[in-house]
Image: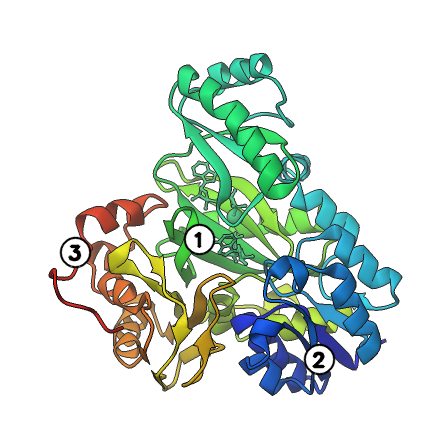
Amino acid sequence: MTIHSVLVANRGEIAVRIIRAAKALGLRTVQVHSQADAGSLAVKLADEAIDIGPAAAKKSYLNIEAVLAAAKAAKVDAIHPGYGFLSENADFAEAVVAAGMKFVGPDAAAIRLLGDKVAARQVAARAGVPTVPGSDGRVSDLTEAAAIVSRIGFPVMIKAAAGGGGRGIRIAHSLEEFERHFPQASAEAAAAFGDGGLYIEKVIEKARHIEVQILGDGTNFVHCYERECSLQRRRQKVWEEAPAAGLPADVRKRLCDSAVALARSVGYSGAGTVEYLYDDASRDFYFIEVNTRIQVEHPVTEMITGLDLVQEMLRIAGGQPLSVSQDDIVIAGHAIECRINAEDPHRGFMPGPGPVETLAVPEGEGIRFDTMLFAGYAVPPFYDSLLGKLIVHGADRDACLAKLRTALAGLGISGIPTTVPLHQALAADADVAAGRFHTRFLEHWLETKFAAPPSGTREVA
Ligand code: ADP
Ligand code: ADP
Ligand code: MG
């Protein structure tokens, strides 16, 4: 069977992105929204819009009952959860299916298994994928934990089994620090994720974050090559690329093959990402987690492969086999994505929601701006600060960077602060241009290279 209609259980730029993909496939689109998003671009673009509650996400976008009631009222065939919100909630995926609809994503069992970062490590290990040295399972008491850290050596990371979004991670450099952090981390994880379970990993120093996009239809499994997301702040991605600069071909092959082996071992269905840390010096890579959803940075993969990953997800949810085989997927050129947030990079990344006065979007071949913005739109203060993503494609990395500098100069958002100046500075940096960076690079660069504007001046983004 194929699906004829889809409800978008998300907001912001990804809701707009899903609606466009669904329309391209001829599907009827239904957008649910909070009261704060009644005037959003996604609401304007969708065939139908349904108010599911107040601004607070818990009462709207995270309210399973309200989303399901809207889906039943609109008689849709499927629900696309986007990223964040309910996208990795196995109970939601199960409830969607129980209500007779398709969940656009893997089945609840796969979400449950891979969403638990400890269980996912075990799945990876069984599939022959190297994992970061660390605990075999959850670590519940300090004695057990101390034995593990003395085996793997400091520094170590204490991570929440249910963590995500860069949260629920702490570093300990000594046993004293570890003994102090461990109980605090457990209490915090319980409060933030409803699960206090912890595990331990060795810190891989100067690692690069490299991840592999996978697609599966339950029978066939392919990879769409890798993305590099090493430029991070607070363990959240800021700038992403595809492919990873200078990755040796044999490493690329092993990395991508291992992601496919993992997908095959669980009979994966839908789009997913297998994340790794990569050590340039030793050429070793280590599995860290699987994201069982579309990711924010998926467009860089689309730009180098020509695939439309959201359309692919919708087709798979409708029971169709993958539209491509591994041999059809080839890397053409290089793509970079800059996340544009409503934050002031010169003032500690303070969020600055509010009305957008004017909007100028760069255009041209190989330039894409995925956004929910329009002139006159007021960015609400209730949700994360992502405004859009500027994605640029070039024949090679140097051409891509050159085009990116021009595109950033042509991106004008007035009325609210944005991270455009940060990306302009990064795009002009010699280390970035040479591809010399790792996951701790940006934090150090922000302290040493990213100058504050002269005092007394007020930047208009
Ligand atoms: P990853 O989860 O590996 O970082 P993405 O960057 O694609 O992959 O997605 C980040 C996820 O975290 C998204 O689901 C997004 O909604 C969520 N997220 C983004 N910013 C924040 C934040 N400040 N706090 C918590 N979650 C966030
Ligand atoms: P999340 O679920 O929040 O996305 P991840 O496990 O994917 O958490 O890790 C997020 C980021 O934290 C990574 O991209 C990397 O920068 C850093 N990180 C995670 N594990 C390690 C590790 N063992 N050593 C060094 N850095 C790590
Ligand atoms: Mg991650």
- Residue under the image location 16 percent in, 56 percent down: 451
Whether residue 103 is visible, yes or no, is no
Circle 2 — which element? strand
**Viewer-nearest residue: 417 or 143:** 417
Residue under numbered circle 2: 30
Q: Earlier in the sequence, mark 2 or mark 3?
A: 2
Tell me the quadrant of the picture where the C terminus can be found. bottom left
Left or right of 276: which side holds 86?
right
Find residue 275 and report its horizontal and vertical position in percent.
53, 48
Work out how far the residue at label 1 is from the one at label 3, CA to CA, in angstroms: 37 Å
Q: Amino acid at mark 2?
A: Val
Name which quarter of the figure residue 289 lies in: top right
Find residue 64 and report its horizontal and vertical position in percent.
75, 60
**Viewer-nearest residue: 31 or 224:** 31
Residue under numbered circle 1: 249
Q: Which mark is residue 451?
A: 3
Whether residue 292 is visible, yes or no, is yes
- Residue under the image location 12 percent in, 60 percent down: 455
Q: Residues within 10 Å of mark 1 (few under 14, many from 20)?
A: few
Left or right of 419: which side holds 375?
right
Left or right of 126: which side holds 102?
right
Left or right of 92: which side holds 412?
left
Name which quarter of the figure residue 92 lies in: bottom right
Q: Residues within 10 Å of mark 2 (few under 14, many from 20)?
A: many
- Residue under the image location 29 percent in, 65 percent down: 423
Work out how far the residue at label 1 is from the one at label 2, CA to CA, in angstroms: 43 Å
Q: Nearer the viewer, mark 1 or mark 2?
A: 2
Q: Tags 1 and 3 in contact by the CB under 8 Å rule?
A: no
Q: Is residue 274 above or below residue 345?
A: above
Q: Tags 2 and 3 in contact by the CB under 8 Å rule?
A: no
Find residue 85 and report its horizontal and vertical position in percent.
62, 58
